[in-house]
Image: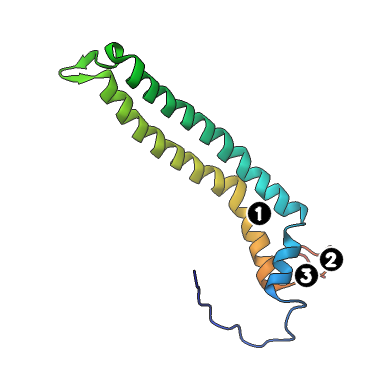
Amino acid sequence: MTTTHSAPEASGPPPDGDLETRSAAMHDDPRFRELRGRLLRFVVPASVAFLAWYLLYVLLSAYAGGFMSTKVVGSANVALFFGLLQFVTTFGIAVLYSRYTNRHFDPLADELREELESGPTVPGARKGEDS
């Protein structure tokens, strides 16, 4: 995948090291590790829960045909409602993931991306502080 970015105007010396070097160094940053941990704390449990829910649906469809063919409303049976709930669950997880990342993931990711793109900063200085 190729992306194009407009070249920044020359406002001073180029940052120390190129983007690849800074990117490699970022992987050792404790904030980056925290970011990965935050992502995994949502993705792994949500994936396991959804796969278990889906497996339940498949197993019930395969081995509990009598239960799954039970009529609930009109000609709609349990299997139809389980199938529709798979869609609801998928969209629900997507909404929860979006909310989770907006609160717990994006602020730190934006900070790290800004630091990575702007080059090295003065040690100990934070955004918004006077140096």
Q: Are marks 2 and 3 in contact (CB under 8 Å)?
A: yes
Residue designated by label 3 = 121
Q: State whether residue 127 is above or below residue 35.
A: below
Identity of the amino acid at label 2? Pro
Query: Residue 14: where, in percent of width, then height?
Result: 72, 83
Q: Image point 66% across, 88% down: which residue?
A: 10
Q: Position of residue 49 (x, y in %)?
A: 51, 29
At label 3, which amino acid type do we have? Thr
Mark 1 Cα-neighbour bin, 10 Å: few <14, some 14–19, many ≥20: some
Compared to 22, does 95 lie above or below?
A: above
Helix, strand or loop at label 2? It is loop
The residue wearing badge 1 is 108
What is the distance, in whole Å, between disc 1 and disc 2 at their CAs?
18 Å
Mark 1 in CB contact with mark 3 (< 8 angstroms): no
| Alpha-carbon span between mark 2 and mark 3 | 6 Å
48 left or right of 30 in image: left
State the mark number for residue 123: 2
